[in-house]
Amino acid sequence: MARYYTYLISTLPMLHFRMRPPFSFERFLDICSYLIPAEDIDVLKNCLEINGDCREKINPTLSRWREFDRSLRNELVKLRAARKRGGSLRYIRGDGYADPSVAHVAVHAYRTHSLLEAEEILDRARWEFLEGLAVGHHFDIDFLIAYACKLLILERWGRIEASDKVRELERTLASASGKGPATTGHFVS
């Protein structure tokens, strides 16, 4: 029998892609722990594990999410392997099949010159998939799974935006040029 968490879900703030997370994933679990059973908390904790078995009997919604994410990652592996003319089979997870729309997203992200923009394309596709998973699930565990996964995406973007971009750029340029730390202006021997 499905459980409904009307009070909990109606008190959660709405999430929008690239917004600042209203709270951490850990805080979300803490909030939920007072209002839903332990077995559903365990399901939500499984949202952290992206490499879990997609056929696992944890929850059908979580399995569909994992399958989508794995398909997206597999498509990126295929594209990168084709560029290097190497075999991708040892890196493919599952059967390797991907929906054509997933392949399209992967190609679009792969062809983008900006790494940050490519990550945004991939995460936006993930976000939209999660939106689709939540359709028709207003107050149940499936809604909470989609919410938890979106919260994890927002946390990731929060870390990206909080990073010291100047320091990261200098470090990247220095390592690419082989000159050591770019901030000193001296060659490192």
Image (cartoon, rainbow, N blue to C red):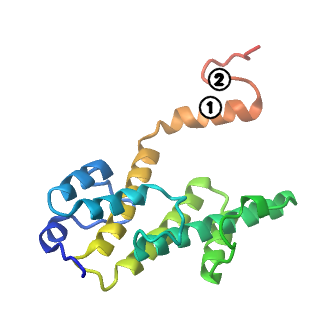
Toward which corner of the image does residue 45 lie, by quadrant? Answer: bottom left
Of 64 and 162, nearer the camera is 64
Residue at the spot 29% in from the left edge and 63% down from the top edge: 39
Q: Secondary structure at mark 2?
A: loop
Q: Are marks 1 and 2 in contact (CB under 8 Å)?
A: yes
Q: Amino acid at mark 2?
A: Pro
Q: Is residue 84 left or right of residue 180?
A: right
Q: CA distance from mark 1 to mark 2?
A: 6 Å
**Residue 67 vertical position relative to residue 44 in the rendered view, above or below:** below
The local crowd at label 1, few if under 14, some if 14 to 19, many if 20 or more residues have their Cα within 10 Å, is some
| Quadrant into which the N terminus falls | bottom left
Residue 171 - label? 1
Q: Amino acid at mark 1?
A: Arg
Reading the image, the residue beneath label 2 is 181
Q: Give the percent coordinates (x, y) of residue 84.
A: 84, 57
Q: Is residue 102 visible?
A: yes
Residue 109 is tagged as: none
